[in-house]
Image: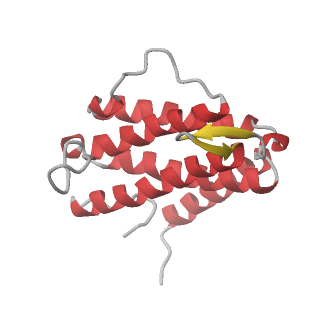
Amino acid sequence: MRIMPFRVAALALVVSAGIAHAQQAPAGVQGEMLASFDDAASKMVQLAQAIPAEKYGWRPAEGVRSVSEVLMHVAGGGYYVMGAVGMPSPAGLPQNMEAVTAKADVIRMLQQSIDAVRGAMRSMPAADLDKATTLFWQPATYRSVALLATVHVHEHLGQLIAYARSNGVTPPWSGQ
């Protein structure tokens, strides 16, 4: 098997970026959640960029979220979930984020949400992980909120991979 030079260079860049990023991440479970969140969030943005703008309205069936609706659901969900630990939503956020459909706006707003969630997770003191809060009208901890934010991105990344492949788009990181 012949490895193409650009793949070797790309792999080296990803590994070095991951090492540099890991050096800045919090320790313990907090760092592990952040690394998992970062991985899925990065892939989601890559996929959002790879899917053509004309496919942003595509949905697999009537009554199921479209590509843009899934991406904006994740963006809005990040603000909502992390609001339980005191992360404010930015001023001027649309009431119905899923109504935003233009590819450039969707990607911009998704990235802003990811950056905000990442910042909130990174700045959360480890001592606060067991701190009590309320999420979806139920008792929760800061840890469970951060975990839900992480799991939510993973859940919808899987959905978006299926959407992309249904439309002939290969996830950029997969190579096939």
Q: Residue at x 53, y 24 (%)?
A: 89
The answer to which quarter of the image holds residue 164 is bottom left
Residue drawn at the location 57% of the way across and 54% of the way down:
39
Q: Position of residue 146 (x, y in %)?
A: 64, 46
Q: Is residue 47 above or below residue 121?
A: below
Q: Quadrant of the C terminus?
A: bottom left
Residue extending furthest toward the right:
127
Residue name at image x 23 percent, y 51 percent: 64
The residue sitting at the bottom extreme is: 1
Which of 175/153 is in front?
Answer: 153
- On screen, 88 above or below 5? above
**Residue 45 appearing in the image:** yes
Question: x, y percentage for residue 4?
Answer: 48, 70
Q: Residue furthest top?
A: 92
Viewer-proximal residue among 121 and 106: 121
Question: What residue is drawn where x is 43% and y is 21%?
Answer: 93
Q: Is residue 19 visible?
A: no
Residue 87's quadrant in the figure? top right
In the rendered image, residue 144, in percent from the top left (x then y), is placed at 65, 50
Q: Residue furthest left?
A: 62
Q: Where is residue 163 shown, x and y percent of the image?
A: 28, 57
Depth check, front residue: 83 or 98: 83
> In the shown orientation, is residue 74 left or right of residue 139?
left
Q: How many marks?
A: 0
